[in-house]
Image: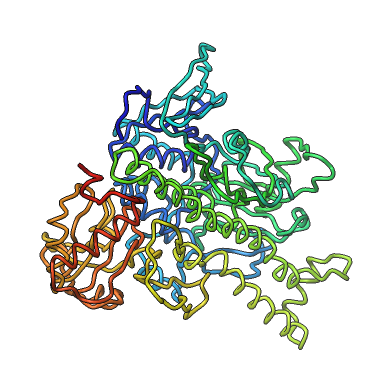
Amino acid sequence: MSDSEVFDADVLVVGAGPMGATTALALATYGVRVAMVSRWTWVANTPRAHIANQRALEVLRDLGVEEEVLRVATPWDQMGDMLFATSLAGEEIARLRAWGTGDARRGDYLSGSPCPLLDVVQPLLEPVLVQNAAARGTDLRFNTEYLGHEQDGQGVTARLQDRVTGREYTFRTRYLVGADGARSQIAEEAELPFEGQMARAGTVYVRFDANLSRYVEHRPSTLHWIASPAAEFGEIGMAVLRAVRPWDQWIAGWGFDMADGEPEYSPEALLDRVRILIGDPDIDLTIRSVSTWYVNQQHALHYSRGRVFCGGDAVHRHPPSSGLGSNTSIQDAFNLAWKLAYVIQGHAAPNLLDSYSPERAPVGKQVVARANQSRLDYRPIQECFKDLGAKDPFAAGMRRLKDPGPEGERVREALYQALELKQTEFSAQGTELNQRYESSAVVPEPDAAPEEWKRDRGLYLQATTRPGAKIPHAWLVGRDGRRLSTLDVTGKGKFSLVTGIAGQAWSAATDELDVPYLRTVVIGESGSADPYGEWRGVRELPEGGALLVRPDGYVAWRHSEPVNNTGDARKLLEQALHTVLGWETTTIEEANR
């Protein structure tokens, strides 16, 4: 993109959380001039979001920071032996193999992605994103308040304030990205339409330090659910003990009645409550902070207005149940960043950006619904260990669970069924990886029948090369003899034309087009060999067919028949690129001169 106006940056990102920092990192990686501002002194100082699912790790892998995140995270094998008990030291009610760690699901996760799941809290994740964004050229401005903006046909003028000196100034940018959280000023200024409600339930979080190794090392998990009269209020009806760092940094959380206002606890009362949940009245612990947060159930119907784009918590607001918050935010950023880069660098028409909302808004709606439903899905578990007609519902419920008679048998069966329902929250690989995009940046196959889901769409990944789906993971072998994924030979800011050894016409067509953002990946040749035959098993097209894979790893177009003539291949490929990149009148060659 060229004009005579001087811009302070091509993109201004407001907010340095997972969405903002990933957007800045990706744009800087793609060579775009990007600035990121935050009103805070540094990154998040509390361990808010923490689950990193496979798709988020795939994004970080593409951006070259996965290994750094792995080094600071709690590993996958320490996440999943989820406990339900009367206290951490008390009687167990049940355990649940979560996050794909159980024998029944681990293979699904290993075959679905080259990446694991991790537990990585925001104060550890965000520095990796921010520092790498800075190292790659992002103009970082902490202690900088966003005050407002005005946009016109050429760009956006933002008003900023240095919170240290009080100086106000304007910042001129081509595009503005609002990653400013659930109370987003930018989303409000852009008058984005929302559905749902905010603050429909309240939760207390107590952050504390205590060495609880003897209670959890033999059954390691991120979350431990405590069924206790001390925490029976609300939808979940249980307290949670969440491991922030194994096994000496923790959060205790429980619901409160919003009608009574925010709860007030003395330090002594908090110590007593946390010790009850642990089940050890003599445990040595230090309370670090107390906070309240509110359960939101709200999503934006579209994410942009003109040159202003929003993402992350600014447009999908929900509780942490299902661990979808920061993961979805990172994916919003990855979807938006390459499109901004291509428009700014002149590779795509501006209307490519119109595909952002149609692709990401349905995902935001889905995760808001899923996270809130996951809270409701604790009710069947509660019903199994609480006998509501008894004077002491918890004690009576535990006796009933152990009853050798028909009533005990019935309740135990109901408990196992209730735990199985929770797999929709804690081993929902499909929810995390089965997104399908429909937009102008995806070319549907003519007369294609609707996709048929062979298993539960929320629980199980269904890998496919259909346009609008993420390219399936398959292990290949590189020139050095080491394994690499199909995700490793695509992406990295470029489109990839993926074909096989029989697809020489496609490779020649790519060479003839000679555009800087398109590579050919010939699976079977040196550098992307398929000795395992894994790609053959998932490609869903003959070796001489072709896939056009976008920079974010999603299939933009598929040609399911072999093409032997270079001219025909070039015409088909050029038409596909022309459509996806939003060009209406020019050819690809003319657009990139």
- The one of 45 and 152 positioned closer to us in this rendering: 152
Q: Is residue 136 above or below residue 323?
A: above
Q: Which quadrant would residue 372 be assigned to in this image?
A: bottom right
**Of 344 and 582, the residue lying toward us:** 582
Instruction: Point out residue 185 in the picture as x, y percentages from the top left corner.
Output: 60, 33
According to the image, what is the colour scheme of the structure? rainbow
Q: Which of the pair 311/459 is nearer the observer?
A: 311
Q: Residue at x 24, y 69 (%)?
A: 546
Q: Percent position (x, y) of residue 452?
A: 47, 79
Q: Position of residue 267 (x, y in %)?
A: 72, 35
Q: Is residue 429 left or right of residue 203?
A: left
Instruction: Please identify the quarter of the rendering in which residue 437 is found.
Output: bottom left
Tell me: residue 158, above or below residue 32: above
Up the image or down, 81 lies above or below 350; here it is below
| Residue 235 in picture, x, y percent from top left | 73, 59
Answer with the quarter of the image where residue 382 lies.
Answer: bottom right
Residue occupying image coordinates x 41% and y 47%:
351
Position of the N terminus by quadrant = top left
Question: Closest to the observer: 147 or 345?
Answer: 345
Left or right: 581, with 244 as reference point: left
- Report how many numbered discs are placed on residues in the image: 0
Residue, far front: 585
- Whether 560 is drawn above or below 118: the answer is below
Q: Quadrant of the C terminus?
A: top left
